[in-house]
Image (spheres, rainbow, N blue to C red):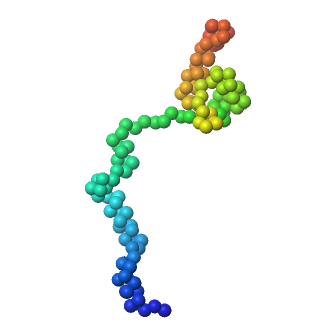
Amino acid sequence: MTSSGDFETFKDIHGERKGRMNRSKDVKKASNPGSRRQTGLTLPEDTMASETKYSLPRVMTVKELSDYLRVHPSTIYKLLRRGELPGFRIGTDWRFNVEVIDRWCLERNIKAPDGGTSSQS
């Protein structure tokens, strides 16, 4: 067993060990808004408060789009091959912007192949 004198010598040589209590005080100091500005650190909430907030457009996968349009996924791929469906690729996967798809659906319903509207009988 070691004596308390050995521990005191260890502390003198290596310095006092920071325990959980000391680290939590350091974290509290760093999270204090006043000290954060003094050190020049900016956290995401500081940056986001000064920027205009916006939302990213909703993007769907082939499976999600097929569920949304109530068609089979192979129909989605067929329309993509023909160049009739607006979409973009991320690597090898297709993605679709919901707003663009909604607009595409409206345009398809308005324009019929014979030049009339498809909603008329």
The mark total stands at 0
Q: Which quarter of the figure has residue 107? A: top right
Relative height, residue 70 to residue 49 (above, below):
above
- 16 relative position to 120: left or right: left
**Where is residue 93 shown, x and y percent of the image?**
63, 36
- Tell which residue pokes out farthest to the front in this image: 13
Between residue 105 and residue 76, name the one nearer to us. 76
**Where is residue 98 shown, x and y percent of the image?**
56, 30
**Where is residue 59 shown, x and y percent of the image?**
56, 34
Between residue 31 and residue 88, name the one nearer to us. 88
Relative height, residue 53 to residue 12 (above, below):
above
Q: Which quarter of the figure has residue 81? A: top right
**Where is residue 73 shown, x and y percent of the image?**
70, 32
Q: Residue at x 37, y 48 (%)?
A: 45
Q: Which quarter of the figure has residue 16? A: bottom left
Quadrant (top left, top right, bottom left, bottom right) of the C terminus = top right
Q: Is residue 64 visible?
A: no
Relative height, residue 14 to residue 5 (above, below):
above
Q: Residue at x 69, y 29 (%)?
A: 77
